[in-house]
Amino acid sequence: MPKRILVTADAVGGVWQYSLDLARGLSRLGIATVVAVMGPSPSEEQRAAAGVIPGLKLIDTGLALDWLAEDGAALRDAARGIAALAKDAEVDIVQLNSAALAAEADFPAPVVVVHHSCVATWWAAVHASPLPHDFVWRTDMVRAGLHAAAAIVTPTTAFGEAVQRTYALDAAPRTVHNGRTPLVVRHGALHDFVFTAGRLWDEGKNLATVDAAAASVGVPVRAAGPLKGPNGAEVMFDNLHCLGNLGEEEIARWLSARPVFVSAALYEPFGLSVLEAAAAGCPLILSDIPTFRELWEGVATFVPPRDEQGFVRAISDLVGDDFERSVQGHATAERAARFTPDVMAAQMATLYRGLLPAVRRPVLAARAAA
C-alpha cells in the first residue's frame, strides 16, 4: 500500500467533506494524507475537523480553484504548485479532485483524478445550450487532464457515463461511491416539516422548484446552506425558511426530527446532503435523475425535477403520515449504511496500489524463493 498520498480539496463544497472522510478511512489502513486546500481558506471549524483525523496534514495553498480561476495561466500555476508540494511531501500517489490540473504540470507520482463535477456536465444538465465562452477553455483543460490521468474515478456510474460522453474517453471512469461519516443525530419526536440542504445559490440544485412548491404545502420548508456563492451568484426565495450556512451539529439537530428531505436537483453527481439525511432516517423525495436513481432506487420517491405540482403531491402524501415516514426512513437508513468512509477508502487504496511501480510492491514469490 502507499504510505502517503496528496489530495487536493477546497473548503467551498462537498469536496471538503469528501476529502476528510477519505483521509479518515485511509488512516485506518495506515495511509497518511496531505490535504492541499485550493481557493478560499478553510474556516476555523473546518480546520478543527481536519485536525482530529490521524495522519492528516492540512496545507492552505492559496492556489486558484479550478472553477474560480480567472484564466488558464492561473490554473497552470496552481498545477505547478501542487506538483511541487507533492514532491516536497514525498507522496506515493497524487489524487486531484480537479481534473484540469492533471495535464498542466509534471507530477512526481501517479495521478488519480476523482472527477466530482465539472462546468460542461453542469451546463448540459441545467441549460442544455452551447457552452458560454468562459466555460469553453475550462472544459478544454478538464478534457486534457482526464486524458493525462493514470486513472479516473467518478462517484456514480451514471455520472461516469456522462463524463465519458462529454470528454470522449476511451473507457468509462471507475466508480467509487462516496462514503460519509454519519452525523451524530439524537432522534426525538417526528416533526412535520420539509428540509433541504446544499449550495442554495447553485442553479443546479434547482431550489426555485422547491421554493414554488413550498407555497402550496401546509408545513414549513426549511433550507440550510449559503445563498451567495464565491463566484458572485446570489439568490433569494419567497417561501423557503432559509437557515443560513449551518455546521454539522446544527444540521444533525434539524435531522433529528426526521423531516421529509427534498432535493429537486437538476445536476447532482452524488449528493452528500441526501446521504446525510438518509443516514439519519429521513424519508427522501428526490428529482428523477440518473444518479439519484442509481443510489436510491427502491427507497426514495422520485419526481421529475421541474414538476412543481409533483413535489407538492409527494410532500403532501408523506407529511402527517408518521407510519409511512418511519417505514421509508428505515429503508433509507439501511441503504445509507452501504456508503461508508471505510468502504470508499478500501476501494481507493486498491486503486492506488495498482498504480505503484512493481519495484515498490512486495514481491512475495521472490522472497519465498530466497
Image (cartoon, grey):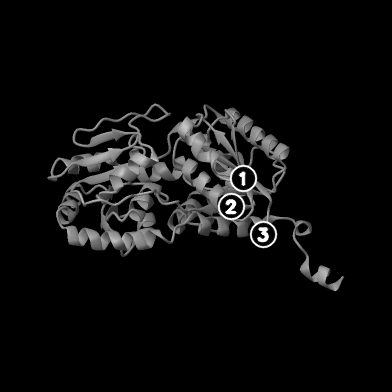
Q: Does residue 11 appear anywhere in the picture?
A: no
Q: Which residue is mark 2?
A: 26
Tell whether 242 sits left or right of 229.
Answer: left
> Relative to the observer, which residue lies in front, 328 or 81?
328
Residue 18 placed where, x, y %? 49, 46
Tell me which residue sits at (47%, 43%) in the image: 17
Tell whether 189 sits left or right of 153.
Answer: left
Between the residue at mark 1 and the residue at mark 2, the CA separation in whole angstroms equals: 9 Å
> Relative to the observer, which residue lies in front, 117 or 262?
262
Name the front one of labels 1 and 3: 1
Q: Does residue 14 appear anywhere in the picture?
A: yes
Name the front one of labels 1 and 2: 1
Between the residue at mark 1 and the residue at mark 3, the CA separation in whole angstroms equals: 22 Å
- Kind of residue indicated by mark 2: Leu
Residue 37 placed where, x, y %? 56, 35
Pick out the residue farthest to the right.
370
Q: How many numbered marks are there? A: 3
Q: Secondary structure at mark 3?
A: helix
Tell me which residue sits at (57%, 40%) in the image: 8
Label placed on residue 354: 3
Tell whether 90 sits left or right of 299.
Answer: right
Task: Give the mark, 2 or 3, whose residue is nearer the N terminus.
Answer: 2
2 and 3 marks in contact (CB < 8 Å): no
Q: Quadrant of the N terminus?
A: bottom right
In the rendered image, the vertical position of residue 138 relative to residue 301, given as above or below: above
1 and 2 marks in contact (CB < 8 Å): yes
Residue 176 placed where, x, y %? 51, 57
Q: Which residue is mark 1?
A: 55
- Kind of residue indicated by mark 3: Gly
Q: Secondary structure at mark 2?
A: helix
